[in-house]
Amino acid sequence: MAKMKPLSFLLLVATSYHQCEALSAPTPTTNSRRDFLQTAVASTIAAATTTATGAATSVLPSAVANAAESVPATNSAAALKLPPIGLGAWAWGDSLFWGYNPKNDNDLKEVFDYALSKNLAFFDTAELYGLGRSESLIGKYRKESCTTKEDEEKVIVASKFGALPWRTKREDVVKACEASVKRLGGKPIDLYQIHFPNAYANEAYWDGLGDAYEQGLVKAVGVSNYGVDAMRACHAKLAERGIKLTSNQIQMSLLYRWPIDNGLLDACKELDVKVLSYSPLALGFLVGKYNKDNLPNGPRSKIGKQLFEDDAFDNLQVIMKDIAAKHDAVPSQVALNWCIAKGTIPIPGARTLKQAKQNLATLDWTLSAEEEKMLDEASSKVTGFITPDKNPFPREDKDTGLKMYDS
């Protein structure tokens, strides 16, 4: 793979390849690719859901005919309250990028239970994470661990709709949401987001978000990977129905500062849109685990080679370690506290109890103004990480000309 691609691209490629292999079918032609991928995603989610729950459930892109019947209407205008940090569940089921193995499900259960015990059980997932597996695991763990209504109310789940090319109608959002609700255990989703922009049909997705909200499938709605103009347009469209755009989940870290530099973070604050910062540990490169002689496996390896050739990154790491030592902390907590200092809610991934404890212990201390400034200055000089132009999200809605993505 020449360059690392974000989740949407990786999943489509992986799904296409593994389904061809499993079915002993030839690689699909251009004319059949759309139908092939649609079938592939649906069947793979079915397999993932069956494995996680022990019983098959409705899968994408089919509708869940009666899902809404089991979900009480929830049209409250009250703002969704989120904790200052969450846990990302991309790795919970993703074998391609994160090397997921079902044998490690007990480790994930420990992560869930620990977060619950700390009243920080805020999990961000998506229908595309593990092609349904991530959602199913969270639904399974919630059922097993939440024995009281009080426990159930402590768990906050955010999930996402995949804006795949063949999905062009508002009904597609509702159908996908119904399937996610079912995988997550039949409860309304606390926060439902558009995972990434499409090259068209984006306004239909916003209508679908509103429909899911008004039908009581979700308690709040948001977007992800939206630029300034797209976020403003979605905010206005939902406001016409009296629905608040709660959040914009964007990539942001000490190594990916674009939302600060291009005004996206300021626009979110202006509209009172919460910012969920994904990949706040920059794919693990801000943890202090890797170096030029110890690179991660898979697509991250090439990024690491480039990053560790950047002297500015070495300097940033030294500063992070110094700050961590002053607080009896670890570098990852420095990176997460920087995101919090910028007014965002970081959602780092956690696959082990150790990672969960380190991530959530970030809240035990805060950066001083001087430390934040030192990190600002050092991180602004690093050039070896991913840049927005390398991300394949559509820049523009071809139907409306609206600029969809900038960072």
Image: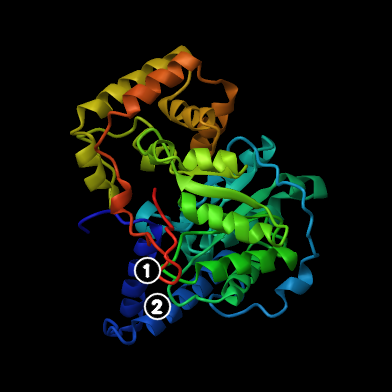
Q: Are the residues tagged 1 and 2 within 8 Å (C-beta)?
A: yes
Residue 261's disc is none
The mark that comes first in sequence, 1 or 2, is: 1
Asked where in the image residue 143 lies, by quadrant, the reply is bottom right
* Res. 159 visible in picture: no
Residue at point 80%, 45% (across, down):
150
Label 2 sits on residue: 37
Q: How many marks?
A: 2
Binning the other alpha carbons within 10 Å of mark 1 as few (below 14), some (14 to 19) or many (20 upward) gives: some
Q: Which residue is at 33% across, 68% downward?
A: 13
**As shown in the figure, which amino acid type bears the numbered disc 2?**
Leu
Q: For the point 42% across and 17% down, which residue is it?
A: 323
In the visual, does 178 lie left or right of 260? Answer: right
Task: Tell me the quarter of the image containing the N terminus.
Answer: bottom left
Residue 18 lies, in percent from the top left, at 34, 72
CA gap, disc 1 and disc 2? 7 Å
Residue 310 x, y percent position in the rendering: 20, 32
Q: Is residue 100 above or below residue 283?
A: below
Q: In the displayed structure, does residue 37 sit left or right of residue 191?
A: left
Query: In front: 169, or 366?
Result: 169
Q: Is residue 382 above or below residue 70?
A: above
